[in-house]
Amino acid sequence: MAVVGYFGTFIYRDGQWQQRSGAGPELVVDVHDSDIATIDYRPAPAGRGRFYLGHQPRDYFGDPEASNPVDVPAEVEAFLGWAGATLGRSPRAEDVRPLLAEHAGQPSTDDAVEDTVVRLLALIDVPVPPGFGLEDG
């Protein structure tokens, strides 16, 4: 029997985890099969606002059309600016950058991307969402 990883989408806005996306600044964490976490932060500078933890979809699926390439240094800088303006806390770039998926073949330091998400949330002082990482069903 194949083991299925964790899937879940979480939206942080107005100081708490929400059920739906809305107006105003927010952080969206979307975990795919414990291997990819898409991190969207809004508002973001033009051309920015999304990066990945674990693997980039284009590498994970072996399909360059699965996701746009990520300019990791630019995303780190934009995310730090967003975190400072939105959350009042901006971690150091050297703490955030190693968490981002950069390119194919990059070894992950965590067995499951959920662990990387928890590390990122700790850096920006955002609590772990209720039920995060618990298997569905």
Image (tube, grey):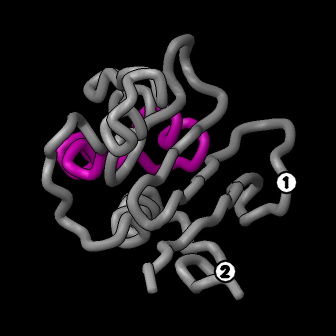
In the rendered image, residue 57, in percent from the top left (x then y), is placed at 42, 39
Q: Nearer the viewer, residue 71 or 103?
A: 103
Q: Image point 55% across, 74% down: which residue?
A: 128
Q: Residue furthest top?
A: 46
Disc tally is 2
Query: Which mark, residue 130?
Result: 2
In the rendered image, residue 95, in percent from the top left (x then y), is placed at 22, 51
Q: Main secondary structure of the magenta part?
A: helix
Between discs 2 and 1, the one toward the N terminus: 1
Q: Nearer the viewer, residue 3 or 8?
A: 3
| Left or right: 66 in relation to 54 | right
Q: Residue furthest front?
A: 1
Q: Is residue 86 magenta?
A: yes
Q: Image point 37% across, 50% down: which residue?
A: 53
Instruction: Say few, some or many: other residues with alpha carbon within 10 Å of mark 1 (under 14 / 14 to 19 / 20 or more).
Output: few
In the rendered image, residue 102, in percent from the top left (x then y), is placed at 24, 36
| Left or right: 42 in relation to 110 | right
Q: Image point 29% across, 43% down: which residue?
A: 101
Q: Is residue 17 magenta?
A: no
Q: Image point 67% across, 60% down: which residue?
A: 10
Marks 2/1: CA–CA distance = 15 Å
The residue indicated by pointer 1 is: 20
Query: Which mark, residue 47?
Result: none
Quadrant hosting residue 18: bottom right
In the rendered image, residue 137, in percent from the top left (x then y), is placed at 71, 88
Quadrant hosting residue 23: top right
Q: In the rendered structure, which amino acid carries the disc numbered 2?
A: Pro
Q: In the rendered structure, which amino acid carries the disc numbered 1?
A: Arg
Q: Nearer the viewer, residue 101 or 97?
A: 101
Q: Which residues are magenta?
A: 80-100
